[in-house]
Image (cartoon, rainbow, N blue to C red):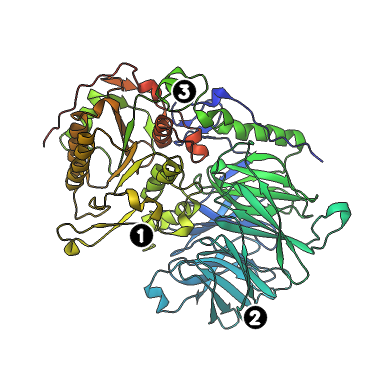
Amino acid sequence: MRKIVVVAVVVMASLLAAGQTVGPQADGGVLLNNGWTIRPAGQQVAVGSFPMSNAVSENGKYLLVLNAGYAPPSVSVIDIAAKKEVGRTQVADAWLGLAVAQAKNLVYVSGGTTGKVLEFSLNPDTGALTPGRELAAVSERAKQGNVMVGDVALSADAHLLYAANLYGDSISVINLQTGARVDTWKTGRRPYRILVPPGGKQLIISCWGEAALYQHDANNGTLITKVRAGLHPTDMLWINKPAPGENGKSSYAARLFVAAANTNNVYSFGVGPDGQLSLLEAINVATTPMHPLGMTPSALASDEKGNRLYVVCSDANAVAEIAISEPRGLVLGFIPTGWYPTALTVLKDGGLAVSNGKSNTTGFVAVPADEQLMTFTRTVLRNSPYTDDLLYGPPGDAQKSFFANGDGHASPIQHVIYVIKEHGTEDERTTPNLHQLARDYIQFDNFFANADTGAEGQNWASAAIAPDYTVKLGPSASAHRSKVYDFEGGEPANAPPAGYLWNNALQAGISIRGYGQWTANVPLKDVTGGKQIAAVKDPALAPYVDMNYRGFDSAYTDVERAKEFIREWKEFDEKGQAPQLLIVRMPGDAADNDQAVGMLADAVSHSKLWPSTAVFVMESSGQSRAAAWVISPYTHRGTVDHTLYNQMSVLRTMELIVGLRPMTQFDAGARPMFSSFSRQPDTRPYSFLAR
């Protein structure tokens, strides 16, 4: 057996350095806006927008790839031998579901928000896809609501097709002979993957929103049992051979592996003679012993003999290779992939086909031998800015030691105001305050967003990660194919791995105050004097929220929001005591937002609490380049910082100031912004500029 090669490697050179530029690097890698680098193994083939699933044709000649990103969805056909896309068929909508009917050269594709499953004929010689029937997976009445047909699977005899209705929490059953939907079965919340075990007597459904697997009778949909699994269970893999046991003995006829995207684990279940599932182990796919959450295991495959398990780690841009021929799984190493891998298939020659959601590619790589796997693993470690030493901030950093709170040392900054704005900075005539604040304090000319969409942005800003639910469904919402926008609290399937910034603060005993983040509003017409106008989506945050501060609402201005914040800040100032962390959302348009930020900066900088306060302002959305402001007596005045930072740098800096551990691998590995800070405070206030 190979020796384990996953070790804690300290590579301080991997820290982001001043002057780095996002994009192609001299060594052939690509530096991403989130601070990571991709150096994918194998040959990459361009496909459509955000490939989500892939499958091999019956003759093994073609790889089909379902693309379901912001651009119109499509199905790519790749000639495996030539490593070339030979066709791309656009569809009205699609999401996740892709199945190949063996012996028939038929392909089934989920129709996403159309409520249909699309049937295609695949020419085994040319790879051409010919549209066939459009099979209704939901009723016309159901289509009036929120519909997202996702995964599809065939019955053992290929006479029935099962389709998951994500928002309907149900499984549709379609008779492929007649094309009619013959039944609908209720299942758990947000069904993600459908698995039909050998024999076809039951279905196993992984339910994104319940951390559970549902086992149903395949004949009538009766719920057999519900089994707890890891948070955000996604892909499942059935190994149809006895589970390895101690001394070669096993009471399990097969094993089921489940990827849990909100953990760093893949869970192994033993399958008893009656189909009952028993948890055997949790296999940790993190790259180091202390690695925070954020690997996002999301897709699984195995070699033909069932001795090797391959795990897509979406947020690590890697595939983990695990030996599973012994009673306990052993992580052997990692294979570098493109950006945000989503799916993989083991080809007939034993190689891997890995589809990369954010790179818009599918890579083909031979399974590496021992020495090559060690080299690949070192590349995966080098691609990440995270090392275990960074859990407490960059070691030996004098600036961090001065401004961070911990080890018996209090930060001179006692109050952090975190302003999350949504719109970009326009010309100076429109946004005079934001321009003046940058000139008066410090400008960041190499600052990047971590998010690709607005849906992702709010999660990155609050949780140091965009959950897999947001990443996979956000593009459909942004492209206006889906009517559902449930990415800002309240949806269990979208809960982040380590909670939100405020959860982290409350657990650490840090005082907080919330203004408009993760709140739902009472309609303005119902608002009367003294009545609450907000309701909190996260119950843990409720006691700490200003209920008079209105959340997202295009009919309400940021200027009004700023007035409410200033009212409370004056109360804090009179008492000489304010919360340690204040989280403020300002979702207004550019001009409105500029006035509100200017008002806030004026009020805070003219208060008695100003000498111990820092205001961090950050754009939550935007692709690639973004803007940020750090307004404090402790920032260098009138300077430009060329260091490469991103949104996680803001979070990490605030965490260190108030004394918080990082939430995920992304804020843990981010470069703090303390090089922009001066140990000699300059308490001159800022004066608001009216338009």
Density class for disc 1 (Cα within 10 Å; few <14, some 14-19, many ≥20) is few
Q: Which amino acid lies under the numbered mark 3 shown in the image of this protein?
A: Ala
Inter-mark Cα distance, 2 to 1: 37 Å
Q: Nearer the viewer, residue 637 or 25?
A: 637
In the picture, which quadrant includes the N terminus? top right
Q: Residue furthest right?
A: 247
Residue 588 horizontal/vertical position (percent): 23, 47
Element assignment for label 3:
loop
Instruction: Please give the residue where the numbered disc 1 appears in the rendered image.
Output: 480
User: Would you say residue 638 is visible in this rendering?
Assistant: yes
Image depth: mark 2 or mark 1 in front: 2
Of callouts 2 and 1, the N-terminal one: 2
Q: Is residue 426 left or right of residue 320?
A: left
> Residue placed at 66% from the left, 40% from the top?
334
Mark 3 surroundings: few (<14), some (14-19) or many (≥20) residues within 10 A: few
| Mark 2–mark 3 CB contact (< 8 Å) | no
Tell me residue 312's x, y (percent). Answer: 61, 48
Mark-to-mark CA distance, 2 and 3: 60 Å
Residue 219: give its label.
2
Query: Badge 3 is on which residue?
Result: 17
**Front-most of 143 and 617?**
617
